[in-house]
Amino acid sequence: MTVRYCFPRTHRLLRPAEFQTVFDSAAFKVGEQHFVLLVRPNGLDHPRLGLVIAKKKVRLSVERNRLKRTIRESFRFHQAQLPAVDVIFMARNDLGSVVSAELAAALGKSWKRLERKAGTRPSAGAAEPQA
């Protein structure tokens, strides 16, 4: 089976209600020095990504857009290994000073940690095995 490296609208968090659901009931967090990922199972057959990069955290729009491109690209390449979760990327201070290659490497590690953490937790709708 071939893996498709695309990022269609169905793989994005678009509506405020979708973001609010993750903010209100995040199952776990994956944190790095410059960013944090909020994660919640979504009940779909694919992961979805939402970005929160505030102007207060990254002043220049050029930098915010560069960061968004780098994050989307990293997600696009790792989405096949990720479980069915909603992920919100939240910027922390000094994210704008991070070089794209350094951000991509940190995201690669974070996707692996997310996959490990999500794999150890039972899914929301799955019943516990009876002994």
Image (cartoon, helix red, strand yellow):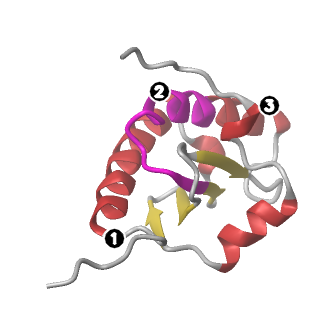
Query: Could you tell me residue 96's position as x and y percent?
Result: 65, 44
Q: Residues within 10 Å of mark 1 (few under 14, many from 20)?
A: few
| Count of marks, rendered view | 3
At 72% from the left edge and 71% from the top edge, which residue is drawn?
Answer: 21
At 80% from the left edge and 31% from the top edge, which residue is drawn?
Answer: 62
Q: How crowded is mark 3: few (under 14 residues within 10 Å), some or many (20 or more)?
A: few
State the residue position of label 3. Answer: 62
Above or below: residue 9 compared with residue 89: above
* Span highlighted in magenta in the image: 70-87
State the residue position of label 1. Answer: 121
Cα distance, mark 3 to mark 2?
23 Å
At 33% from the left edge and 55% from the top edge, which residue is drawn?
Answer: 113
- Asked which secondary structure carries label 3, the reply is helix
Query: Could you tell me residue 2's position as x and y percent?
Result: 40, 14
Q: Mark 3 or mark 2, which is nearer to you?
A: 2
- Mark linked to residue 77: 2
In the depicted view, which residue is nearer to us: 47 or 124?
A: 124
Amino acid carrying label 2: it is Phe
Above or below: residue 102 compared with residue 77: below
Q: Image quadrant for the C terminus?
A: bottom left
Q: Residues within 10 Å of mark 2 (few under 14, many from 20)?
A: some
Query: Could you tell me residue 119's position as x and y percent?
Result: 31, 59
